[in-house]
Amino acid sequence: MVAVRHSRYTHGLIEKSKQFTVNVPRRGMEKIVDFCGTVSGRDHDKFKEMGLTAMKAKRVSVPIISECSIHYECRVLFQTEVFPNRITKGVHYRWYRSEDYHTLYFGKVVSLYKSPGRGKRRQSK
């Protein structure tokens, strides 16, 4: 399951493809993960800026990140929204003051494997 805010570029991509990948980063990729988690793909080419390699996945049409160590390829089986009336005031205050709620995508793992090793190992800058 992945949780993706409506405002995120990834949200539209998953809505269109009904697929996603989860790529487990290697040690030493902490700054890359931080960068990718704080900037939007609408405004930045994260692959180019971080020297990452998009690679064709085995069983889904969306790419994997070659430099990562493990890849989960998933097809969306079910999705649901985080509804404001179903969360506590504390959770709402801490995570949803902007009212940018998540969609929860439940995926079936259709392929799971270690990196084929085609990408170079990237160290944090």
Image: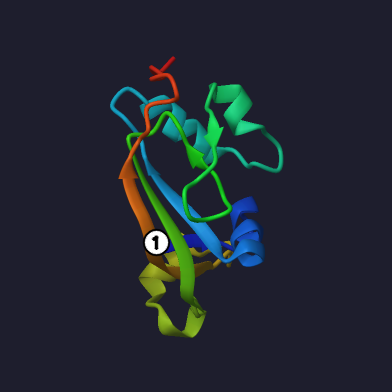
Residue visible at 38% across and 17% down? 123
Question: Is 107 located above or below residue 64 in the figure?
Answer: below
Looking at the image, the residue that sits furthest to the front is 58
Residue 58: image location, x then y, percent: 47, 48
What is the number of callouts on the image?
1
Residue visible at 50% across and 56% down? 20
Pointer 1: residues within 10 angstroms few (<14), some, or many (20+)? few
The answer to whether residue 39 is left or right of residue 58 is right
Residue 63: image location, x then y, percent: 54, 44
- Residue 94 seen: yes
Residue 2 found in image quarter: bottom left
Q: Quadrant of the C terminus?
A: top left
Question: Is 2 located above or below residue 63 in the figure?
Answer: below
- Residue 104 seen: no
Colour scheme employed for the rendering of this structure: rainbow
Residue type at mark 1: give it. Answer: Val
Q: Which residue is mark 1?
A: 110
Residue visible at 57% across and 50% down? 62
Question: Is 78 located above or below residue 19 in the figure?
Answer: below
Question: Is 102 located above or below residue 79 in the figure?
Answer: above
The answer to whether residue 5 is left or right of residue 90 is right
What kind of element bears circle 1? Answer: strand
- Residue in front for this viewpoint, 77 or 33: 77
